[in-house]
Image (cartoon, rainbow, N blue to C red):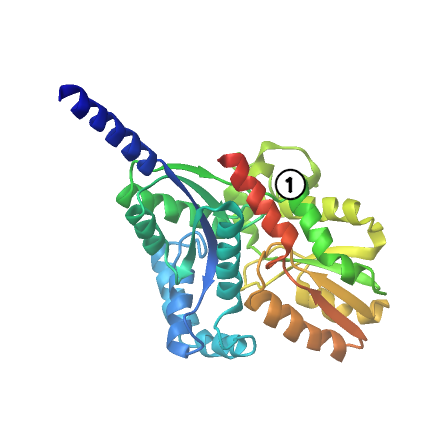
Amino acid sequence: MHTGRSERSRISELVLKKFMSKKAVLLINLGSPDSIEVKDVRRYLKQFLMDPRVMDSSPFIRWWVVNFLILPFRPKKTAEAYKRIWTHEGSPLIIYSKDLQNALSEVTNMDVELAMSYGQPTIADAVKRLKEKNIAELLIIPLFPHYAMSSYETALVAIMEAIRKMMPNLKTETLQPFYQDLDYIDALVESSKSYLNKDFDHLLFSFHGLPERHLRKSDPSHSHCMVTPDCCNTCNPAHATCYKHQCLQTVKLFAQRANLPAEKYSVSFQSRLGRDPWLQPYTDHQISQFPEKGIKKLLVICPAFVADCLETLEEIAMADKESFIDAGGVSFEQIPCLNMHPRWIEFLMNKVKLWT
């Protein structure tokens, strides 16, 4: 009898151990309003702009600027922009992210959760679901190829805070920024191939902009970024957290892989907010000036975004296209983001397999 109880106890322990060693993956992206209603856009913008890693001024100044200078006016304009890209299923960013979640779960046969830094589905809800499933090990995949305090860092801080509160014993690993991973670069090139095979004058790499001060704050030495001449091309440990350097590395590797001559492409930065100096040159300025320089057939790619969203579908493919054509341009195409491209799914699948 004693032996039987011991055997049953041992089997129960093994079953429990297997049950408790379940692994899962968490995808994190920036987020989107719940709807195109002004009230929902206002709520989303408030959550986003009140993040101290996005608007990094003092708490009082941030509160005053957001509540008195931005929220009374910007939500209506932003809601109108969202209306131009909204689908019957909702926000393109959320749709693509959910499709990616399902595809990655299917090819890896694992639990894959999805969370947004702002809006739905929330990070707290994702962690709650992980807890309910008794997940013991988690691979966190921030869907940001490049490091920035306002995207990669703030998402990681938020998820780790939620895990400490709700699942303190959860074992985690995080996918680091993959801006120069050759498999990621190859996915970008492959997804762009049909566009690059067309007749075009110029390819513009447009990255989401950042205030210049963010680069200085992200530099642990506080003596390299925006200080050293040609800082992005001067080898330094600060490059591990330098958004601009990482963007330029992505472009360099893409151009090498795609055999692009130097005169055929350039880099710019979009989506600036406020009057402080942001990374230059500015995308909208470049695009409106291209036709007078003889660039009439333009391609634009946005490698900082892995899923098409407001910044690519409305800002680039609509507003900037209109500016380009009005300035004398002939053809303008935005190369879609990776979205659901098979090479992108394969890239993530391989990262999961290496982890498991």
Q: In this rendering, is residue 355 above or below 202?
A: above
Query: Is 267 in front, or is 73?
Result: 267
The N terminus appears in which quarter of the rendering? top left
Q: Label 1 sits on what residue type? A: Asp
Query: Which residue is denoted by mark 1 in the rendering?
Result: 181
Measuring from the top left, give residue 177's x and y in whole percent.
56, 43
Identified at 59% across, 32% down, the residue is 237
Identified at 51% across, 52% down, the residue is 106
Identified at 30% across, 29% down, the residue is 14
Residue 42 image-quadrant placement: bottom left
Q: How many marks?
A: 1
Measuring from the top left, give residue 298's x and y in whole percent.
78, 67
Q: Residues within 10 Å of mark 1 (few under 14, many from 20)?
A: some
Residue 240 image-quadrant placement: top right
Query: Is 321 in front, or is 213?
Result: 321
**Left or right of residue 31: residue 238:** right
Is residue 10 shown to the viewer in this render? yes
Give the SS element for disc 1. Answer: loop
